[in-house]
Image: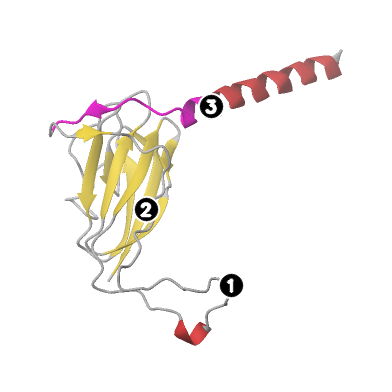
Amino acid sequence: MNKTLLGAIIAVVVVIGAVMLLNNNATAPSTEDTNNETVNPAPTPTQTPTPNPSETPNPNPSQTPNPSQTPTPNPSASPRTYDVSMTDTGFAPSTLAIKKGDTVKFTNNGTRAIWPASAPHPTHTDYPAFDPKRGIAVGESWSFTFDQVGTWRYHDHSNATRFGSVTVTE
């Protein structure tokens, strides 16, 4: 009897987990943010790197490049935008490493308003500008450009048990 009950509980948990996973992978329709810009919530929380136009492709891909010839990152590269998906279970990715001047776009893919804000809760004093001053509605996005070097912890002001961090380097 106990084994049957335990098996049934495990099956229910697996089904609920699969439904939640499928719901998190669903693509939300386009919506409009408060700036009247069309917003397409990001289906994945990572940003595809932009190729560096100063690098030339290897004409013979079967040749392994010499490690001493590995190109160095271009310090004058254009700023990038990184996507963070906000859901009812937290931020994804919850940690990012970016360069000074890069932007992080927080998109609400959850079912309630989510308010990303600088630590500590509730004062947001570590990086006061990193605070939209309100919850971001479902389907809406809010972007912030990081112009200060450091590791900036943040949280959902409406549910401070959900948090993340952005490390900004020169």
- The reply to whether residue 123 is in sight is no
Task: State the CA–CA distance, disc 3 to disc 2.
Answer: 26 Å
Q: Position of residue 165 (x, y in %)?
A: 37, 53
Closer to the camera, 36 or 88? 36
Q: Nearer the viewer, mark 1 or mark 3?
A: 1
Q: Position of residue 109 (x, y in %)?
A: 37, 31
Residue at image position (33%, 34%) is 41
Q: Is residue 53 above or below residue 31?
A: below
Which residue matches tag 2? 165
Q: Residues within 10 Å of mark 3 (few under 14, many from 20)?
A: few
- Tag 3: residue type? Leu
Residue at image position (28%, 45%) is 105
* Image quarter hosting the C terminus: bottom left
Q: Is residue 113 above or below residue 75?
A: above
The mark that comes first in sequence, 1 or 3, is 3
The mark that comes first in sequence, 3 or 2, is 3
- Tag 1: residue type? Ser
Residues drawn in magenta: 22-34
Please tell me in which quadrant of the rendered image residue 148 appears.
bottom left
* Image quarter hosting the N terminus: top right
Q: Nearer the viewer, mark 3 or mark 2?
A: 3
Closer to the camera, 57 or 5? 57
Q: Secondary structure at mark 1?
A: loop
Q: Position of residue 122 (x, y in %)?
A: 26, 41
Mark carried by residue 22: 3
Q: Secondary structure at mark 2?
A: strand
Residue at image position (64%, 21%) is 15
Which residue matches tag 1? 62
Q: Residues within 10 Å of mark 2 (few under 14, many from 20)?
A: some
